[in-house]
Structures are given as structure tokens and as C-alpha cells.
Amino acid sequence: MRTDKGYVLIILMMVVLVLAIGLTVAIPVYQTELQREKEAELIFRGRQYVEAVRLFQIKTPGSFPSSLKELEEKKFIRKLYKDPMTASGEWNVVLPLGQPGRAGSEGAQKVLVAPESALPAIRNPVVLGVVSSSTHKSIKLYYDQDSYDKWLFTYGQDPEKPPEIVYYGREEKEKK
């Protein structure tokens, strides 16, 4: 009888080993799938903001929203979506740089990417769209960009001619 218990213990240990190996393989696959789902959600939410800015342009030609909150208050977007790639859910906003009057359908050659919280410090902000504040590498390429902070969701964006991105706060540091 003692030998039977020994075999059961060995079989039980082998089952645990097989389960551990299976989990070691399954967890990275699950994490990759979860990241792909978040990327799809990022694209959906980003495009919701692009559509809201487009509708804002149709209703108020020649002007752009000064904040994401304005899009919600004036009912151009159903709700303010969170950035799915960050824990805080806060977006960076995309603003034209240098030519605020020429933003939109002509496309901006340079854009300023700033945290939404920095909008009060910017004189007459012109919100063209949003971009994730996450700097992590993506699985998917979006308009040939492989990190979320370069996935611009802006009104009038030409995918063939991406604008040069200037990050808020960095241009002042570079000048010093």
C-alpha cells in the first residue's frame, strides 16, 4: 500500500508541473491579448474625440474647442472618455503650434502635445484632438507609429504627412 501513495504523489507533482508550465505560456498570451484590446479601445476613443472636433467645426465654422470639457458641455461628445493606456486615464491634448488660425483641415506642420491639466496656462488653446500620455511601445502600428504618445487623434490629420510633435514644457528646456 505504501508504494501506491508514492505513485499518487509523483503523479500529483507531475500534474502541478504541467499546470505551472501551461500557466507560464498562457500568461504572456493573455497579457498580449489584453494589450491588443486596450489598443483597439484607444483607437475607438481617440476617434470619438476626432468626430467631436469635426462636429464642433461644422456647428461653429472657423473655431475649435478650447478644452475637452467644452466638447462635452456643448454636447459634441456623449461623455469624456478616459485614456485606456494609463492608470490615471488622462489624455494629452493636441494643439497647433505656431499657426493657430491655420489649424484643422489644412493640417498642422507642427503640433504641441500638452497634458489636459496644462490648458489653463496656454493662451487661447485650440484643441485639435487627443493623444495618449503613455510612452509605452505598442503591439500594433497606427499610422506607422509604434508608441502610444505618437498615436495622434486629430481633426484634419493626413496620415501620409504626420506633423512634427513638440511636447509641452520641453521646448522651454531646450531653449535654455
Image (cartoon, rainbow, N blue to C red):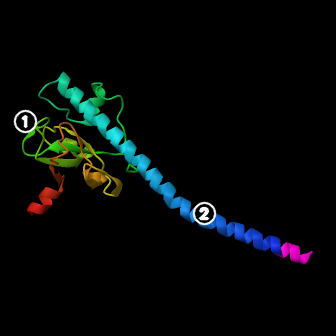
Residue drawn 92% across and 74% down? Answer: 1
Report the residue at 50% width, 57% height from top.
29
Question: Of the residues under marks 1 and 2, which one precedes in the sequence?
Answer: 2
Q: Residues within 10 Å of mark 2 (few under 14, many from 20)?
A: few
Residue 98 appears in the figure:
yes
Percent across and percent down for residue 17 are 66, 69
Inspect the magenta stretch and tell me whether residue 4 lies in it: yes
Residue on which disc 1 sits: 101
Instruction: Identify the residue shown where x is 12% and y is 62%.
Output: 174
Q: Mark 1 or mark 2, which is nearer to you?
A: 2
Residue at the extreme right of the image, as rendered: 1
Q: Secondary structure at mark 2?
A: helix
For numbered disc 1, what is the local secondary structure? helix
Query: What is the CA distance from the residue labelled 1 to the residue labelled 2?
Result: 58 Å
Counting labels gives 2
In the current view of this chain or complex, which residue is farthest to the front?
160
- Chief SS of the magenta region: helix
Does 27 sit left or right of 56 as displayed?
A: right
Q: For this rendering, which residue is in front, 143 or 129?
A: 143
Amino acid carrying label 2: it is Gly
Marks 1 and 2 close (CB-CB < 8 Å): no
Q: Is residue 61 above or below residue 37?
A: above
Kind of residue at badge 1: Gly
- As for residue 41 lying within the magenta part, the answer is no
Magenta segment, which residues? Answer: 1-6
Q: Taking the image as drawn, is residue 84 in sight?
A: no
Indicate the quadrant containing the C terminus: top left, top right, bottom left or bottom right.
bottom left
Q: Residue at x 79, y 72 (%)?
A: 9
**Residue 76: where, in percent of width, then height?**
28, 27
Q: Which residue matches tag 2?
A: 22
- Looking at the picture, tell me which residue is in the foreground, 165 or 29: 29
